[in-house]
Image: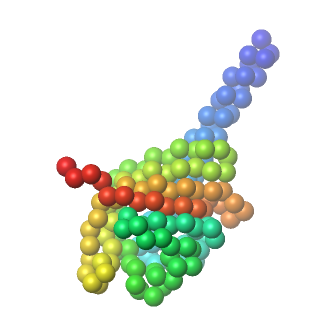
Amino acid sequence: MLKRILFVFLVGALLVSAADIAAEVEKAERDWGAAMMKNDYAALDKLISNDLYYRHSNGLVDTKASYLGALKSGKSRYYEINFEEVVVRPVDSKTALAFAKAVYVTKAADGSKQTMPLMTLHVFRKGASGWQLLAHQSARPPAK
């Protein structure tokens, strides 16, 4: 009987923990989006891992330094990120996957604004300063 009670307690604790992780990572995902739109480099520095691997939907890859550099120089700009869906899947207590569907309004190569619906996969890792974006992969949704 005691073993059964302990088992139920431990399973319940794990479920709460997974739900807590999912909520924390969803907040980090949305905080990243808000910081991108505000060009809040201090927030982005905290939210982005030094080991960032960021593959854009066009195939180009950025590190943390090149990603933040493009934002600071004005070469890259995110005007709007409108999340339609964010689904978080914890892997363990320090790693989680965030799958999002959002409409991005960004600066195009010619300087104009472009609107792109994107599906993204973000890998978050929890460190001393909280949840940080470790990897990004985006793709355009299939044509309807």
Residue 102 in the image: above or below residue 45:
above
Where residue 33 sits in the image (x, y, percent)?
44, 65
> Closer to the camera, 143 or 79?
143
Specify whether residue 133 is in view: no
What count of labels does the image hold?
0
Picture residue at 54% right of the left edge, 61% below the top: 135
Q: Is residue 113 visible?
A: yes
Classify residue 50 as left or right of residue 35.
Answer: right
- Residue extending farthest left: 144
Q: Along the horizontal axis of the image, is 30 left or right of 105?
A: right
Please indicate whether residue 137 sits to the left or right of residue 63 in the image: left
- Indicate the position of residue 47 as horizontal and vertical percent values: 58, 67
Q: Is residue 125 left or right of residue 75?
A: right
The x, y position of residue 109, in whole percent, is 31, 81
Residue at 48% from the left image edge and 85% from the top image edge: 72
Q: Residue at x 67, y 28 (%)?
A: 11
Work out whether residue 92 or residue 42 is closer to the camera in this orientation and state it: 92
Quarter of the picture containing the N terminus is top right
Q: Is residue 92 above or below residue 37?
A: above
Residue 44, quarter of the rendered image: bottom right
Q: Residue at x 48, y 70 (%)?
A: 61
